[in-house]
Image (cartoon, coloured by chain):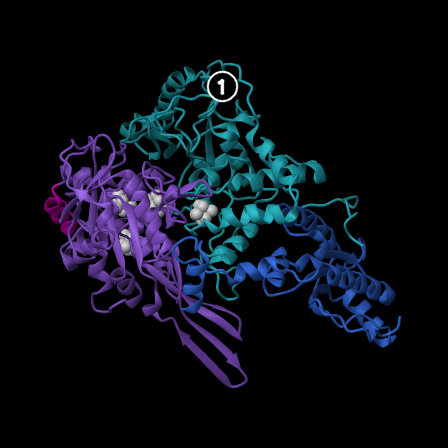
Chain colours: A cyan, B blue, C purple
Amino acid sequence: MNSQLIDTSIYADISRFIRDESLRILLEGEVIAVVGYAAGRRKGSVQPIIACDTESAGRLMFSQASVNNLAVYLTKAKKEIPKSGKIGIVLKGCDLKALVGLIGESQLKREDLYLIGVPCSGVLASTVHPATELATETIAPKCLECDAHLPTGCDFVPDVALPPQQKSDLKYAVEIARLEALTPAERWAYWKEQFSKCIKCYACRQVCPFCFCEQCLCDRNKPQMVETTPRPAGNTAWHIVRAMHLAGRCAGCAECERVCPMDIPLNLLNRKMAKELKELFDYEPGFEVNDKGPLASFTDKDDQSFIK
Amino acid sequence: MKPSSVKYDFEPKIIAFVCTWCTYAGADLAGTSRMQYPSNVRVLKFPCTGRIDPVFILKAFQQGADGVLVSGCHPGDCHYIAGNFHARRRFAAFRKLLEFIGVDLNRLQFSWVSAAEGGKWVEVVTDLTERVREMGPMVEFKELALEEQWSGAINTPELKETYNAI
Amino acid sequence: MRKYISRQNLNTLIDKLIAEGRRIVAPRMTAGTPLYEPLGHSGEMIIDQLPRRSAKEAFFPLCEEIMSYEKSGQQVKLTDVDPSRFPETILFAVRPCDAAAIPVLDAVFSWDYKDEFFLERRRKTTVVGLACTTADDACFCTAVGLSPSDTKGSDLFLSPLEGGGYNVESFTEKGEALINSCSDLFAEESNAAYIQLANPQTEAFDLKKVKSWLDEHFEDQLWDGIATRCVGCGACAFVCPACHCFDIVDEGTEKAGKRRKNWDACGFWKFTHHASGHNPRDLQPKRYRNRIMHKFKYYDDKFGQTLCTGCGRCVRICPVGIDIAAIVEEINQK
Ligand code: SF4
Ligand code: SF4
Ligand code: SF4
Ligand code: SF4
């Protein structure tokens, strides 16, 4: 499929709206900080900032390089951000799903947050330079499968008209179907090659909003359930544990895959589990707070055809 | 069932994670009723299937199991009311994950065996043992465990030899 | 010694060395990612992409066994790894920023404790550097006193020429030995024009000034300002050619197992976590501060060198866009 440019003209307006609203809530004392995006040194690059004053709030912006899911900064795992007052946060639809998941897991309280939702046409894939234009070839694959371009239930959403979404290949769906059609031995070989590259930098874990455990099972050595060594055996175990612990919780922000320095397609595992959980338990992450995720609840009619 | 005197080339190692209230009692009943079942199975007792973390199954395969059985109380019979309902969902998901990674699910069996079902225990264990015996040893995780990660891939036989010699 | 080698002959050289059973490590694609890995043949080598991880792993692998144990009855058998059996290796097409880090690492690995695993590999490895023609806006070798044609750390250095081929300069006996081993593949130095090298757009830092600021500012707002957003992964340290922290773990069963040395990183929460539960670097800014301090102050205090070669890998890879060049520049401006 030929690459087509994606219209991101609304991002300039969105940036202005985010700045104005953040300045307002900071000045009026409604929040003590706004977690948002600001420009970095490299051309087009964007980094998270925690704006506590008008100077830093003036640097807030949004662009196709605003890839981070900022919800991670609100979790227990990040102790650096003061939790002494209400916090404002800028969220894309996928990020909001994660935040809603965290509320469902009693990690956050809605009333402690001021949510600034972003109508989003998509952000860049991790493989391209941040100054690249957004196009069907350079957009993050998650954005092609996104059903949450317009966040709902926020305290503030910039009033801009989202351009219509372009149709494109669904990379994850295609790749999952390809892998499912292989034999177990072929799939094993595929994942073995991928997992072997893992260097156990744990970037995937550290950026995941749902990896908020104060001590990860994979960091424990008494008892040691997962080998910490970055070699094929320990890596495979780590990835199986990670995928299982995120099943039914992952909101699909694909941060793990984006940050992996070794280009391991982590989100394939997440998407596969999401697909299975939808088929098995009719569950999908969304904007509604659920107290119990699919693996924290049950019905007496659940499938047990695999049990003797 | 008669004790088998046939000698096989390959005797699979089967690890059974069972709950103490139903399946363990069922296996005990099989024993006290002098029913015979393959001695390949090593039983590990847990309070409830709800306590059987998927990582235990993973660990069992990594440590050399050729097949794994997870067994507990029938739905509705859980001593802790809903442990097995939670387990049912968790294992439904975990199976799919293992399958996607490339593990042959024929090596993994789940069952409900009550304290009164000594016969069912024998049947489940025998079936799994026979099936895994047919399949041969589970080599995937064992092979992985033998692989070291030096500086990246070791891709020629000579180099492999040099490394193995170290 | 100065010589010329054509691209064709360079490939012939590599294939010949491989056929002789030598281990050749060079940038190649591994499952879609460029890495320094052993080559099967010269065609696998790629020189137009910066490998994702640095060349340090040729000396200091991500994970290596250093000992194994086996228990039978009351007997415990310990087996040490014998570094003298490491194979001779030739590292090809090493970027100047990667090659320059190797002498920097020599200092720490041969300091109070002589790390034979590192040093033996070092002795047995010939480093063939390659002048760099591809830089992006994350590169800043020129800011830390290096350049795309810096030969520091190379035994042999290749400078690409217009019309293909390379002028070759050797700096050490190892480099000369490599040329002499296949001298028919080399010709007299060419006077063809050099290909335009990369041109990183950064001003040189005043590293003395940066250090003297760091000397005085262990406590400073700067750390909170930049590092609150650091998520505490190991990505920056693991891709860095100069980071060299490792952790030693014993893994296995009560019957048999191995002791291994794995990369570690000061960004991790666990890095300074004490058995008592106390953690002196309890918040991320303190951990990130150590990264800057170690690179631009402590290492200088101890060994008179800077622990950064400006490869820009950490800048590209940081999940939250922490940019070491921008931070040092900010300190430089103070
Ligand atoms: S980010 Fe990638 S390399 Fe790092 S631990 Fe996760 S999968 Fe492994
Ligand atoms: S600190 Fe960053 S730029 Fe400097 S050598 Fe390490 S990875 Fe490269
Ligand atoms: S910067 Fe950190 S990880 Fe790198 S060598 Fe220093 S202490 Fe180790
Ligand atoms: S600076 Fe970036 S890459 Fe380094 S530990 Fe922090 S988040 Fe990870």
Where residue A131 appears, x then y in whole percent?
34, 25
Where residue A203 appears, x then y in whole percent?
42, 46
Q: Quadrant of the C terminus of chain B?
A: bottom left
To which residue does mark 1 refer?
Answer: A2
Question: Chain under label 1?
Answer: A
Where residue C139 appears, x then y in whole percent?
25, 37
Where residue A95 appears, x then y in whole percent?
49, 33
Callout 1, which amino acid?
Asn
Residue C64 vs A62, above or below: the answer is below
What secondary structure prevails in the magenta region?
helix
Residue B51 vs A80, above or below: the answer is below
Residue A83 appears in the figure = no
Q: Quadrant of residue B150?
A: bottom left
Residue B82 vs A66, above or below: the answer is below
Query: In the displayed structure, does residue C5 sit left or right of residue A117?
Result: left
**Closer to the camera in the image, C302 or A162:** C302
Q: Residue at x 61, y 36 (%)?
A: A178
Residue C124 appears in the figure = yes
Q: Residue at x 67, y 46 (%)?
A: B96
Q: Quadrant of the N terminus of chain B?
A: bottom right
Q: Residue at x 46, y 53 (%)?
A: A214
Query: In the displayed structure, does residue B149 sit left or right of residue C114?
Result: right
Q: Is residue B100 magenta?
A: no
**Which quarter of the frame holds ligand 3?**
bottom left
Secondary structure of the residue carrying tag 1 is: loop
Residue A285 vs A137, above or below: the answer is below
**Closer to the camera in the image, A185 or A214:** A185
Q: Residues within 10 Å of mark 1 (few under 14, many from 20)?
A: few
Which stretch is magenta? C206-216
**Closer to the camera in the image, A298 or A230:** A230
Query: In the displayed structure, does residue A302 sit left or right of residue C48?
Result: right
Q: Quadrant of residue C231?
A: top left
